[in-house]
Image (cartoon, rainbow, N blue to C red):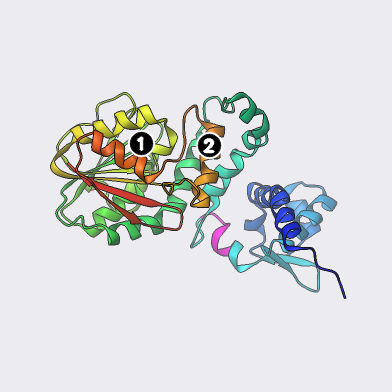
Amino acid sequence: MMAELPEFMRRLDAIAGGFQRSKILFTALKGGVFTLLENPMTAAEVAARLGWDERGTRMLLNGLIALDLADKDNQGRYRNAPIASACLIPGAPMDQTAILNHKANGWEAWAHLDELVRTGKPYPRGDRNDEQVRAFICGMKNIAVESANAMVEAVDIAACRNMLDLGGGPGVYSHACLRKVPALRATVFDLPEVIPIATEEASAAGLLDRMHFVAGDLTKDPLGTGYDLVLVSNIIHSYGPEMNQLLIKKCHQALIPGGMLIIKDFLLDDDQKGPAFGLVFALHMFVHTDEGDTYAVETVRKWTLEAGFSDGKLVELTPQTRMWIVRK
């Protein structure tokens, strides 16, 4: 009988080998392998199409089999597993290619985590190129659709008429709100390089006539006034406490009396022992930003009270995300 590794050893092996599995996925995705494997192909055929080494291609494809992302028939032809067909091809029903490319773009920075922890400085990334910006913004769309739909079911926004989607990226949350409330109009506020993508997405969603777009820096520029709903979705983790307190005060100024502020983020338990996703994501912010972090619910509650909001309520949205909802 084959001996089994003790549970502790299996867990450590899974953690230590995670980088290998992710790199197999990223290499195949960036190379366009999954698009090719919608039709059965041998390793030699894939290598010829991509201009890759045949031996390396064969091993990579076998790695995809190990990850249950591909299969192989008796003629040695590889083909996508259902998960790859559904998620790993641009335009697929559950397309995740943009967010995965965004994660792949962070590979080198994370490889320097030991040095970054010692120095306390983020990885120097320089300016993002157009491909990196698009991967990030469209990646937000990949992961936001389900939580946006869940948000509008969990929060009563029926009386809202003028919404500010702060740092709204592709505008997915605005789209969900607009579909839920036909009388609502939305403003997406984001950096200048993001606005063209947000405009494209609004047009594709058939919502362009109900949306307004403002290019600016939310840390420096005025947000406008007269809103009865301000959404701050996955924004506060990019900044330190001082900037977040300033941002929440700006949101208070932007709202009319009685207006609602929704802060959606990877909010931690007050003892900061979980959720696990938020704890790991804090390190992601450490790697990529000067002051970014994930914050406990009680910390965010304190910030909103200090800004002049009434006490709020916590709403569980997904296993990773929570919403803190307050009114002016």
The residue tagged 2 is 132
Which sits in the foreground, 239 or 271? 271
Q: Residue furthest front?
A: 271
Q: Say if 317 sits above or below 308 in the image.
A: below
For the point 74% across and 62% down, the residue is 66
**For the residue carrying disc 1, how many other residues have a C-alpha within 10 Å: few (<14), some (14-19), or many (20+)?**
many
The residue tagged 1 is 195
Span colored in magenta: 85-90
Please give the label number shown on residue 20: none
Q: Is residue 320 visible?
A: yes
Which comes sooner in the sequence, label 1 or label 2? 2
Q: Which image quadrant: the C terminus?
A: top left
Left or right? Give the position of 293 relative to 205: right
Left or right? Give the position of 186 relative to 127: left
**For the residue carrying disc 2, how many other residues have a C-alpha within 10 Å: few (<14), some (14-19), or many (20+)?**
some
Q: Amino acid at mark 2?
A: Gln
Under circle 2, the secondary element is helix
Q: Say if 88 sits above or below 197 in the image.
A: below
